[in-house]
Image: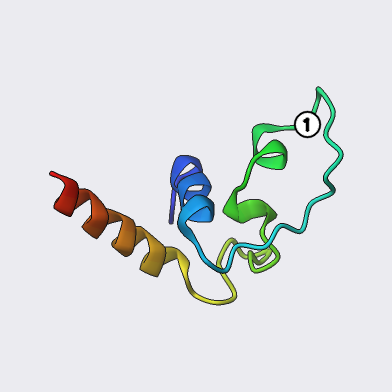
Amino acid sequence: MASKEQLRKIALYCDEYSSNRDESHTLTSSYEERYENCTNCKHYTQKGTCSLDLIDKVLTSMSMDNEFKS
């Protein structure tokens, strides 16, 4: 299971991210509601998974990118 921080980063790197949220935000909007995050992607399911099965793939890709930068 990915952490909240990982879900936010995945949304930034994922080519299939597509927001399902209302673009109007208020001061009381949560962090997840204001910024790209898997939890507000149309592919994120109620079970906490990606319907396209991309969470692990994007995490792996991000990990490989970090290894090359080192």
- Image quadrant assignment for residue 20: bottom right
**What count of labels does the image hold?**
1
Crowding around mark 1 (Cα neighbors within 10 Å: few <14, some 14 to 19, many 20+) is few
Q: Say left or right for 63 vs 16.
A: left
Figure quadrant of the C terminus: top left
Image coordinates of residue 40 in percent, x first then y, are: 69, 53
Residue found at the far left of this picture: 70
Q: Secondary structure at mark 1?
A: loop
Figure quadrant of the N terminus: bottom left
Q: Say left or right for 65 vs 70.
A: right
- Image quadrant assignment for residue 47: bottom right
Q: State the residue position of label 1.
A: 29
- Image quadrant assignment for residue 44: bottom right
Q: Residue at x 81, y 25 (%)?
A: 28
Q: Residue at x 45, y 64 (%)?
A: 55
Image coordinates of residue 24 in percent, x first then y, are: 87, 39
Q: Nearer the viewer, residue 55 or 48?
A: 55
Q: Residue at x 55, y 77 (%)?
A: 52
